[in-house]
Image (cartoon, helix red, strand yellow):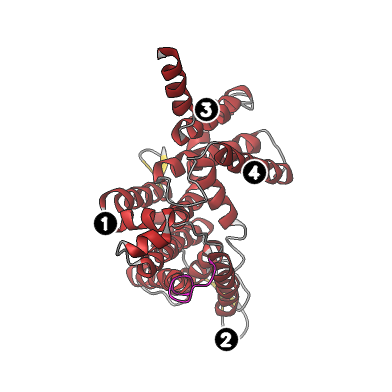
Amino acid sequence: MMQTRSSVSLGSWLASPTVRALAALLVVFGLGLLLHADGAFYKWHTHRDMLRAVSVYGILACGMTVVIITAGIDLSVGSVLALVAVLFAMMTIHWQWSWMSAVSLCLLAGIGCGVLSGWLIGPLRIQPFIATLAMMVFARGMAKWVSGGQKISTAVQQPDGTYQYVPVPEIFQMLSAKIFGGNLTVVTLIMLGCIIMTWILLKKLRYGRYLYAVGGNEQAARLSGVPVNAVKILAYGLAGLFSAVAGICQAAQELQGDPEAGGGYELSAIAMVVIGGTTLQGGRGSIWLTLIGILTIGYLEKILSINAVGEDKRLMLTGLIIVAAVLLQKSKRI
C-alpha cells in the first residue's frame, strides 16, 4: 500500500507543470553546455545578450499569459507593438515631444487596442481568434498608414525632399543602455518589472481570481457574480498595455519605428506561455511558468544562433517544440 501511495505521489510530482517546465529548461541548458561554440556559452555576455534579445518577447508573453488564463488568445500583440513603435519614434524623433508625454500616449494607445479587442470578445461575444485577428490586421494597417509605409528613423525628410539627421532621443539611449558594469540591460529589468506586475495581479488581487474563474468555467463564474465581460476587457487591455511597453522597447533598441516590426512575435509569445506549462484550456497557469518558458525559448534560440544554425531550422524546431508541449499537456491534464 505504501509503495502504491509512493508511486502515485511520484507520478503526481512528475506530472506537475512546474517540474515539466523546469525539466525542459534544464535539457536546453544542458544542450548549451555540450554545444558551447568554443566556450561562448560559458561567458556571461552570451547570457546577458540572450536576456536582452528575449526581453521584448517576454514582455508580450506577460500579456499573453493573462489572456490564455481566461481561455483566450491574442494574435494582435505583434501588430500593436509595431503601431506603438511607430508612434513612439514619431513623437520623440520627428515631433521632439518629451519622453513622458510620448510614453503616456503610447501606453494609452496600446491599452485602447486591447480594450477594443476585449469589448469585441466580451460584450459582443466574438471569438477571441477572430476578434484579435481583426485587430492584428487593423493595427498593422494603422502602423503603415501613420508612418506612410516608411521606417521612422533619425533621418527626417525636409520640405525640399532632402533628409536631415537629428540626434537620437535620450530616452532611446536610456532604454537600450547596459547597467551594472555592462552586465545587464535596462530592457531586461523592464521585462522583470512586467513579470512582477503580472504576478501581483494574478496572485494578490481579486481580479486575478476572476481571471482564473472565467478561464476555468465562464458560465459558473457568471452565475457566481463574476463580471465576466469586464474581466475579459481587463485581460485584453493588459495585453495591449504590455504590447505598448514592448513596442517602446523595440523602438529604443532599433533606434527607429518600423511598421513591419513584430511580425510573428505573437507566435513566440504563445510558445513561451505554452512551453512554460500554462494550459491553453484556461483556468490554470502562472507567470512563473511563463518565465521558465521565456528562458527555455531564449536559451534555445541563443544556442542555435551561436552554433550558426539557420533561421529556417530554428523556426521548424520551435514549431515542433510547441506541438510537443501541447501534446504533453493533453496527455497529462494540468
Residue toward you, 254 or 311: 311
Q: Which of the two discs, 4 and 2, labels the residue nearer the N terminus? A: 2
Quarter-wise, where is residue 307 in the image? top right
Q: Which of the two discs, 4 and 3, labels the residue nearer the N terminus? A: 3
Callout 2 amino acid: Pro
Q: What secondary structure prevails in the magenta region?
A: loop
Callout 2 environment at 10 Å: few (<14), some (14 to 19), or many (20+)? few
Callout 3 amino acid: Leu
Q: Which of the two discs, 2 and 3, labels the residue nearer the N terminus? A: 3
Residue at 42% over, 17% down: 6
Callout 1 amino acid: Arg
Residue toward you, 20 or 25: 20
* Residue located beneath label 4 in the image: 323
The answer to whether residue 256 is visible is no
Quarter-wise, where is residue 321 in the image? top right
Calculate the distance from the C-alpha at mark 4 to the C-alpha at mark 3: 19 Å
Callout 4 amino acid: Val
* Residue located beneath label 3 in the image: 26
Q: Nearer the viewer, mark 4 or mark 3?
A: 4
* Residue located beneath label 1 in the image: 206
